[in-house]
Each structure stands twice: as C-alpha cells, then as structure tokens.
Amino acid sequence: MLLVDADRPEPVRSGARELALFLTPEPRAEAKEVEETIEGLLLRLEEFCSLTDMIRSDTSQILEENIPLLKAKVMEMRGIYAKVDQLEKRWMPAAPTYELPTLYRTEDYFPVDAGEAAPRTPSCQRRL
C-alpha cells in the first residue's frame, strides 16, 4: 500500500481515475461508427422495400389491366380462326386434285420410253 501524505488528498485514487480515463476508449468514436453502419443498413433496407413495392405495383397492373386485355384478344382471335375454318370448308373442294393440265404434262415433251424420240404435240383439252 502506498503511503499517503497528509498534504495531498488521496493521490492513489486520483491517479487511478486519470489512468482509467486514459485507458478507456472513447465511446463517441465507436458509437459514431456503429451509427453510420446502422444508417447504411437502414438506407439499403429502404431501397429494398421501395423495390419490392414497385414490383408489387407492376404485378398488380399486369394482373388487373394486361391479362384481361390478352384474354379479350385471345377470344377475338378464336372467333377469327373459326370464321377462317368456315371459309376454308365452304370454298375448298371435297377432294382436292393436284393433277396438272394436259398442256403441261411432262410425258408429252420427255417420253419415258427410249423409243419415243419425237415429242408429241400437247392436247389442249382441259380436265375438270
């Protein structure tokens, strides 16, 4: 134990107090750093919330406006396709024939048999 002089009031306690104040870190600097970190996180959280709100509003707009428009267009196109099918049935022959007219028959100009060298004159009769 240190000797205490009568002239000085408690030198050990005042020295210990000064040493404790010197060795104790300043809470202001640490608190300021923590506050800046929290402010940054709060700013990011606010940006994220605004982004999710924007996505939610876009989704609502799509669901409320665009999808009903698309459904109406689909129904309109189905009606058009039905009309086209009816027109095709009305104007298409029952059994389509893909026979060329006799005017353009290849056999008349290029005989299959090697013995037929002279081209025939094409007949102008049309088949129906």
Image: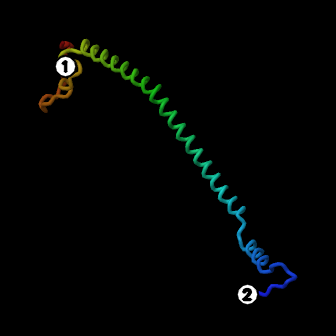
Find residue 17 and report its image quarter.
bottom right
What residue sits 59% from the left and 44% below the top?
A: 47
At label 2, which amino acid type do we have? Met
Identify the residue at horizontal 64%, vertical 56% (top origin). Answer: 37
Left or right of residue 114: residue 66: right
Q: Residues within 10 Å of mark 2 (few under 14, many from 20)?
A: few
Please tell me which of labels 1 and 2 falls first in the chain: 2
- What amino acid does circle 1 point to? Thr
Residue 13 vertical position relative to residue 83 in the rendered view, above or below:
below
91 vs 60, left or right, is left
Quadrant in which residue 79 is drawn: top left
Furthest residue in direction right, as rendered: 7
Q: Where does residue 14 sit, x and y in percent of width and height?
A: 79, 76
Disc number lying in front (1 or 2): 2
Left-right relation of 48 to 13: left
Which percent across, then down, holds residue 102? 20, 18
Q: Position of residue 110 (x, y in %)?
A: 19, 28
Q: Residue at x 30, y 17 (%)?
A: 82
Residue pictured at 55% horizontal, 41% vertical: 51
**Residue of label 1:** 97
Give the position of the C terminus as an image quadrant. top left
Q: Quadrant of residue 13?
A: bottom right
For the residue labelled by badge 1, is the local secondary structure a helix, a strand or a loop? loop
**Residue at label 2?**
1
